Image: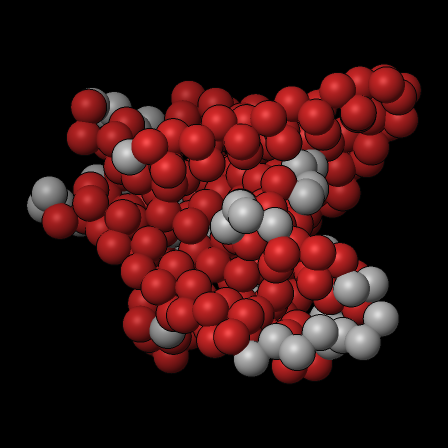
Amino acid sequence: MGRVYRGCRLYGHYIAIHVRSMMQYKVSFFLTAVGQFLVSFNVFLGIFFMFQRFSRVEGFTYSEVLLCFSIVLLEFSLAEMWARGFDQFPGTVRSGEFDRILVRPQNEILQVLGSKFEMTRIGRMLQAVVMFVYGVVKSGVEWDFLKVLTVVFMLIGGTAVFAGLFLIYAGLCFFTLDGLEFMNVFTDGAREFGKYPIGVYGKKMLLFATFFIPYALVQYYPLLFILGRRSGLFYVFLPLFACWFLVPALLLWKFGVRHYKSSGS
């Protein structure tokens, strides 16, 4: 417990340093946050114009889709905010900075996490919150404690899934010394396709998103419970099962660290 406490305290110190650094350039921070808001706003416009033409998509209404997309956008933004260090890990390996990380007494994962904290993602999160509030008001969901708890678990599980993908991306860099752009299909691509419930893409996609990369566990199935289309306590805790995805991601990372022989920089 003492080690965990010291690690959390150190990570909090890393975050404080990044926040103070960003606040030195308040205008730059504000403009970047606005840019993040506008980038995801384009996706919202796509949903808006889609529903100007069609009243439903595979049985889901406009407000229900916004509810779905806002949660996925929040999950992705939270993961990108605190796990951004893994997304930029190829540069850390190429520059030889990871060699320095390995000789320090602190855990290497904690150091990579603390190397970057993207507070500017708050602009994207703000848009997600606005969409979520609109979806809550217009969808007619009868909220109770279990449904609120389901949303909380969706955010926890979804953040873990996206963080696991960033960790896999970083783990693969030990063998390539460069970023693998195809991983964007599973990170940025999942954020884009997550604007609609996974089930609308067909059974094969739903199977893939259930048993391989568990997007559906943090999006589709709990959403059905919130909308009253499924019942059972199982759906409340289902998003937490998605955290298993961190296990293979961590194993790949540890395998990469064991076989790391320096970038030669």
Question: Which residue appears at 51% of the width and 75% of the height?
Answer: 258
Q: Quadrant of residue 58?
A: bottom left
Please say which color scheme the image uses: secondary structure
Residue shown at the point (13%, 49%) measured from the top left: 234
| Residue nearer the viewer, 200 or 38 | 38
In which quadrant of the rendered view does residue 34 lie? top right
Q: Is residue 155 left or right of residue 179?
A: left
- Residue that appears at 54% across and 61% down: 167
Can residue 76 be seen here? The reply is no
State the image quarter where residue 211 is shown: bottom left
Q: Give the total number of marks visible in the rendering.
A: 0
Q: Is residue 96 above or below residue 181?
A: above
Q: Answer with left or right where residue 206 lies relative to residue 111.
A: left
Q: Give the x, y percent position of residue 86.
A: 62, 55
Residues 210 and 143: in front is 210
Query: Quarter of the image containing the C terminus?
Result: bottom right
Does the image show residue 230? yes
Task: Tell which residue pokes out farthest to the left in this image.
Answer: 232
User: Residue at left 37%, top 37%?
Assistant: 4
Look at the image and tell me in which quarter the N terminus lies.
top left
